[in-house]
Image (cartoon, rainbow, N blue to C red):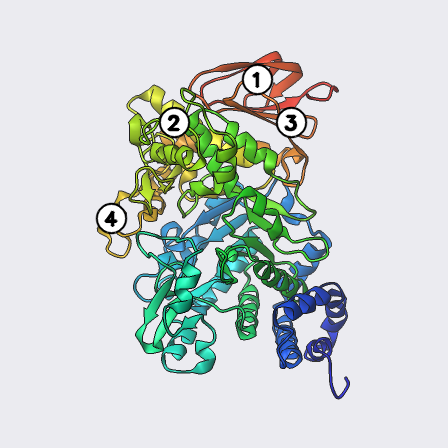
Amino acid sequence: MTNNPTPVERMLAVLPDHLRAEAARRLAGAEPVLRERLAGLYGERADFLPWLGDLMENIGRLHAARPAALRRQDLRRAAQADWFLSQRMLGYCAYVQCFGGTLDGVGRRIGHLRELGVSYLHLLPFLRPRAGENDGGFAVANFDEVDPALGSNADLEALTARLRGAGISLCSDFILNHVADDHAWARGARAGDPAMRAMFHVFPDRTLPDRYERTLGQVFPQAAPGNFSYVEELGGWVWTTFYPYQWDLNYANPAVFAAMAATMLRLANRGIDVFRLDSTAFLWKREGSDCMNQPEAHALLQALRAVVAIAAPGVLLKAEAIVPTRELPAYFGSAAAPECHIAYHSSLMAAGWAALAEQDTELLRRVVAATPALPPAASWLSYVRCHDDIGWNVLRAEAGAGDHAPGEPGADGADGGQAGGAAARLARVARFFSGADGSYAAGAAFQSSDPRAAHGSNGMAASLAGLETAPDDAARAAARRRLLLLHGLALSFGALPVLFMGDELAQRNDYGYSARPQHAMDSRWLQRPQFDQQRWAARHDGGGEAGQVYAALRRLVRLRQSRPELAAGAPLALLPSVDPAVLALARGERFLALLNFSAVPHTLDLPGRWTCLQDDRAMAGGATLEPYGMLWLARDDDAIST
């Protein structure tokens, strides 16, 4: 090594001999992107090159510390970069405390996950959270320590090993945008440490915050209005996009990037396979903008991807960017500078629910048509429900482009019958899922006191689909079909589908949250129940609600696993439909999904000969979809479907 080593030489120097050749190969591919992106962000600083050398040396040390089993997994996955696109991939999302009680308890649920066909488990935040209110664990006080209420770091490493042995990858949230106000950096800032203060955006008065606020939105306008909070010990205002106790990190300071990149690699070395990068859209601040989806935010993510490619290439990055469809592709980056491996398709999820409310697939068809083809070795993430609210505003572009005329489904509402306008249309959908106007849905409005606004919607999928309010067997059957219809969309679209804990058992809303002081102010706890042990015990009882849903969903999962056409990267085509209530999707030339989002049956022409995969019926000439029904069809002849 030279007397003035380069950053790459500094990294290689700290590696043992047996790791250097492979590391040099990875560096040749990823280091130029890492250096270029970081130079674009921090290159004008006089200390850039020494800082970059320190960063690379630390990456090398963390790579050297990576357990041998994980390095072997890295090699296998790097050799098959599209390993996670398979139709056999199925995700499951849960809170540790709700699903298993502790990390060890989650390990005892592995049998249930395997029975479902799960190969990817997303456990919502399980690191040490802020004391007191902590946004469901998204206010992290220590990234290097498991929440003591859930277990220990040793328990985490034991769980990741058990999951690997069962063929299940573990996904962890990695909250990039902010830390809790009792994190060590925040405590240091309060104590007067200038280096710690520089980790955050702190303003001595309201001059700059007021200028920023002119163009900023508000995430929680009721619970936490505004984007800045006064902190007496700082003698100023700190940027708090979400809650006052969540302080936004200042990524204009290179020390923040270096610290967070190292934190991510330490977690990866504990066995985390996938990082859900929380709030990625908010990472960079620019006056005069909404401070979302800024170019520098993408540069930061591309730099993180390069860090992973060098030190832990078996790890995936997943963008939690709840943004309109047209803004999603940027989160995959480019062939020259890849970004995230997976991106949430929240527009698809919201549009599926909207199609049920309107009994019309126009919005959904617009979302599907606007969804670009996936780049190589990348996947959408599809889902029906999650721990968060359904944010309808993600559909503004599609809703504005397809206004309903008066008299059409969805045209009436509490806005005085004024048709047209994306906001009014989405507000009608939001009201529907809060149970207004005779709706079957049992949901709750989120973060809006204006009944005309397109507020978010909360609730478990079964409750939103009508199982909770169904007065008789016929209504319950229709609600089950609605629930399975949305899961059928997520499973057949061409993505990595993720089930939300309890949906496989048709669990309903947890109204007990309102009696828990730590949860009462946040109606998202409506869809965060404890795993229902009684329903789970009855999952094979075909006469019960849980058993019927569980059996039907498992059958769909098994069918998907047997069809290579349903892999994430396989071709998808939106077919024209003569009926606005029906969505028709072709996957390749031999698979057709027909989904009826209305309460009436529909008969469609069906050229050629087909087999209905759900019940092995032979079909030719036509197909009848029952109310809220779905058919997965496999073509029997050699003609190309049209």
For residue 591, which numbered disc appears in the image?
3
Three-letter amino acid code at disc 2? Ala
Q: Quadrant of the C terminus?
A: top right
Tell me if label 4 and label 3 are in contact, CB under 8 Å.
Answer: no
Tell me if label 1 and label 3 are in contact, CB under 8 Å.
Answer: no
Q: Marks 4/2: CA distance? A: 26 Å
Which residue position holds label 1? 578
Three-letter amino acid code at disc 4? Ser
Which residue position holds label 2? 479
Task: Residue 481 in the image: state x and y as whole percent.
Answer: 44, 26
Q: Marks 2/3: CA distance? A: 26 Å
| Circle nearer the N terminus (1, 3) | 1
| Circle nearer the N terminus (2, 1) | 2
For the view shown, which residue lies furthest in the left direction?
515
Q: Marks 4/1: CA distance? A: 46 Å
Query: What residue do we see at 43% from left, 77% from top?
Result: 197
Task: Residue 614 in the image: state x and y as whole percent.
Answer: 55, 24
Task: Residue 1 in the image: state x and y as whole percent.
Answer: 77, 84
| Circle nearer the N terminus (2, 3) | 2
Task: Residue 604 in the image: state x and y as whole percent.
Answer: 57, 14
Could you classify mark 2 by the number of other residues whose Cα lies within 10 Å: few (under 14), some (14-19), or many (20 or more)? many
Q: Marks 4/3: CA distance? A: 46 Å
Q: Is residue 611 above or below residue 223?
A: above
Q: Along the line of sight, which residue is nearer the eye, 150 or 533?
A: 150
